[in-house]
Image (cartoon, rainbow, N blue to C red):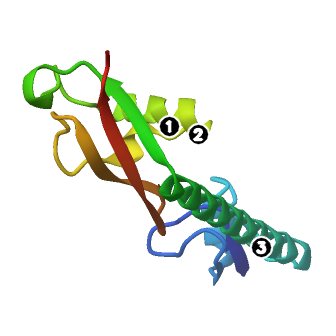
Amino acid sequence: MKVILTQDVPKLGKRGTIVDVSDGHARNFLFVRKLAVEATKENIENEKNRLKNIKLKEERLLAEAQELAKKLEENIIKLKSKAGENGKLYGTVTNKEIAQAIKEQLNHEIDKKKIHINEHIKTLGNYTLEIKLHPQVIAKLRLQVEELK
């Protein structure tokens, strides 16, 4: 019997795969646990539509990430912080502060976990950071740390 897997099944296949299994295995195990549906024309067409929608969504997310990366790379984010002698900061600049500055200056919410700082920011100056917006898109962000007066 041909079935379409609705979830990943170990030793059988991944979701969306059409596999050939025995009638007993299909009826007594896969259908009962809702791991598969029978491979009728209607179900095959539904699966193709689902895969097409997933692909369109991925393409849209990739395009949005590329657009945001371009906007981030064009701008310089300015962050003000208290500093002491020789431009040394009281504490370090955190991912949360950078994400908040991006939200205030560019009106975009960025998850603080996606911001990668190569070195601790402990002095005034200019820095380049990486932000992973999508598995295929990494933006370079220019950060300028200024003294709060």
Mark 3: which secondary structure? Answer: helix
Q: Residue furthest right?
A: 42
49 displayed left or right of 105 = right
Position of residue 65 relative to residue 89, above or below, is: below
The residue indicated by pointer 3 is: 52
Mark 2: which secondary structure? Answer: helix
Q: Position of residue 5 (x, y in %)?
A: 65, 69
Type of amino acid under label 3: Lys
Mark 1: which secondary structure? Answer: helix
**Label disc, if present, on residue 102 of the rendered structure:** 1
88 displayed left or right of 56 = left
Type of amino acid under label 2: Leu
Choose between 46 and 91: the one closer to the eye: 91
- State which tag comes first along the sequence, 1 or 3: 3
3D distance between C-alphas at marks 2 and 1: 5 Å
Type of amino acid under label 1: Ile
Q: Position of residue 149 (x, y in %)?
A: 31, 15
Asked which quadrant contains residue 98, the reply is top left
75 displayed left or right of 80 = right
